[in-house]
Image (cartoon, rainbow, N blue to C red):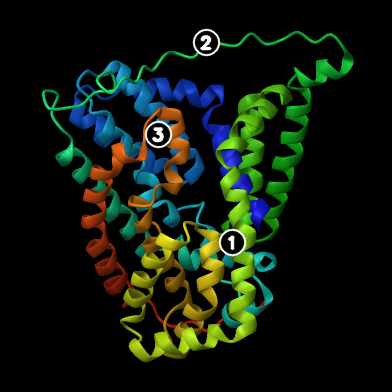
């Protein structure tokens, strides 16, 4: 599981810095004409791209904010930086890179002790239903409006130039020439094309024989990102160079996931899992459990800034509580996904890739991020409660 999540980070970055994406980026940067719309626009792109991959969203939004700051005069660098962070704070976990949803759809990724409680929960029950779509649209609309309404006008903006940030165009690197047969393969797309054909052949076989989208799980998702990243960089040399740039930005994430596995083992082995499950049952009803779990997950996210790792810790007792109260298990997964993103507004850990690319500091974004946070908390809890009423209880499905 640690390696799978590491690949989400690395491949998201690799895709974002590829030449095809940079061309799209330049086209996107030419759309906004006014400072306030430019800021809201960056937030919209960040949120839409986060539904594909949160790592991709962070890097793409950082580069986009840089390009727009060079083109649109009077853009507040703090507001546009906070807008670029919206994807990871609002809806990323409701999309395809949801660690919890993908893990629960992948039997091999679910710890055996948790599997006995939950079984497998397919993506058709979590990501691909109308309730999740409603949450995505409502939260995106609210975030876009807040970003637009709170953006300083040109005369009151603090621009990147005022802050001493100078965004220079990157120089195009000259592709080195091969001098040996081994280097010829390294600088040629032959191996990339061959590997991509094999990869897409595997994916086609998997999806065609296992029920289409129901075959999408954490393993296949990261594998697709890997293949697309290879194609976008075209040669093995460019792809490996991009991976090398990605890993230093994500080194801290590699360290923390094994710790979460240890916490999970302590919970299951000590009996604390049952105590916490009984506590949630005692203070909740079938209708209020989603709100209770949402508040708890948001608070826990301040201490454990992680999507998948934190879910491994929480899942045993919140899903056990859901079973006892006959609350829909898949909706509890989505409750976690929606609430888990809220602490990212005030926890700077996941800002690091964006801050590194944009040359900003976490304190520059704090004010605008906190404003979004105060609006999102009651909105998310209301959505969790009312949409939760539409879900019937489904017993765990064992494969």
Q: Residues within 10 Å of mark 1 (few under 14, many from 20)?
A: few
Q: What residue would you read off at disc 3? A: 61
Quadrant of the image occupied by residue 297? bottom left
In-front residue for pair 366/137: 366
Locate the N terminus by quadrant: bottom right
> Is 7 displayed left or right of 163 in the figure?
right
Q: Position of residue 52 (x, y in %)?
A: 48, 45
Relative to 381, is 99 above or below? above
Q: Position of residue 64 (x, y in %)?
A: 38, 27
| Residue denoted by label 1 | 214
Q: Secondary structure at mark 1?
A: helix
Q: What is the quadrant of residue 392 in the picture?
A: bottom left
Q: Quadrant of the C terminus?
A: bottom right
Mark pair 2, 3: CA separation: 20 Å
Indicate left or right for 75 with 299 as reference. Answer: left
**Which residue is located at x 19 percent, y 24 percent?**
34
* Residue sitting at the far right: 181
Q: Which residue is mark 2?
A: 171
Residue at image x 51%, y 84%? 320
Of the two numbered discs 2 and 3 on the same chain, state the one appearing first in sequence. 3
Q: Secondary structure at mark 2?
A: loop
Q: Looking at the image, do the residues carrying marks 3 and 1 touch, with CB atoms under 8 Å apart? A: no
Is the residue marked by circle 2 packed among few (<14), some (14-19), or many (20+) residues within 10 Å? few
């Amino acid at each position: 599981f640690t390696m799978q999540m590491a690949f989400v980070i690395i491949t998201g970055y690799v895709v974002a810095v590829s030449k095809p994406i940079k061309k799209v980026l330049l086209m996107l940067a030419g759309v906004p004409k006014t400072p306030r719309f430019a800021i809201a626009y960056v937030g919209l792109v960040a949120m839409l791209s986060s539904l594909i991959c949160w790592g991709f969203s962070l890097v793409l939004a950082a580069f986009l904010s840089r390009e727009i700051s060079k083109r649109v005069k009077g853009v507040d660098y703090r507001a546009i930086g906070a807008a670029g962070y919206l994807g990871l704070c609002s809806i990323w976990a409701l999309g395809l890179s949801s660690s919890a949803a993908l893990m629960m759809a992948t039997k091999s990724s679910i710890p055996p002790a948790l599997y006995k409680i939950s079984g497998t929960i397919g993506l058709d029950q979590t990501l691909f239903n109308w309730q999740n779509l409603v949450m995505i649209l409502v939260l995106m609309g609210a975030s876009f409006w807040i970003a637009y309404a709170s953006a300083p006008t040109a005369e009151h903006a603090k621009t990147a130039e005022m802050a001493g940030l100078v965004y220079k165009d990157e120089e195009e690197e000259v592709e080195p020439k091969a001098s040996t047969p081994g280097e010829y393969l390294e600088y040629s797309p032959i191996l990339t094309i061959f590997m991509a054909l094999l990869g897409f052949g595997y994916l086609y076989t998997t999806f065609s024989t296992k029920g289409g989208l129901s075959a999408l799980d954490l393993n296949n998702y990261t594998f697709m990102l890997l293949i697309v990243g290879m194609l976008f960089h075209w040669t093995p040399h460019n792809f490996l160079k991009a991976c090398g740039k990605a890993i230093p930005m994500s080194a801290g994430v590699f360290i923390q996931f094994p710790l979460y596995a240890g916490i999970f083992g302590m919970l299951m082995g000590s009996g604390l899992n049952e105590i916490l499950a009984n506590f949630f049952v005692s203070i909740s009803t079938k209708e209020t459990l989603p709100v209770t779990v949402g508040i708890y997950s948001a608070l826990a996210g301040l201490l454990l800034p992680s999507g998948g790792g934190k879910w491994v810790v929480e899942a045993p007792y919140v899903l056990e509580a859901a079973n006892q109260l006959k609350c829909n298990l898949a909706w509890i997964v989505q409750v976690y996904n929606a609430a888990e993103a809220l602490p990212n507004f005030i926890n700077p850990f996941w800002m690091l890739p964006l801050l590194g690319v944009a040359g900003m500091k976490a304190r520059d974004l704090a004010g605008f991020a906190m404003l979004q946070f105060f609006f999102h908390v009651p909105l998310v809890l209301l959505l969790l409660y009312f949409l939760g009423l539409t879900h019937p209880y489904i017993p765990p499905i064992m494969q």
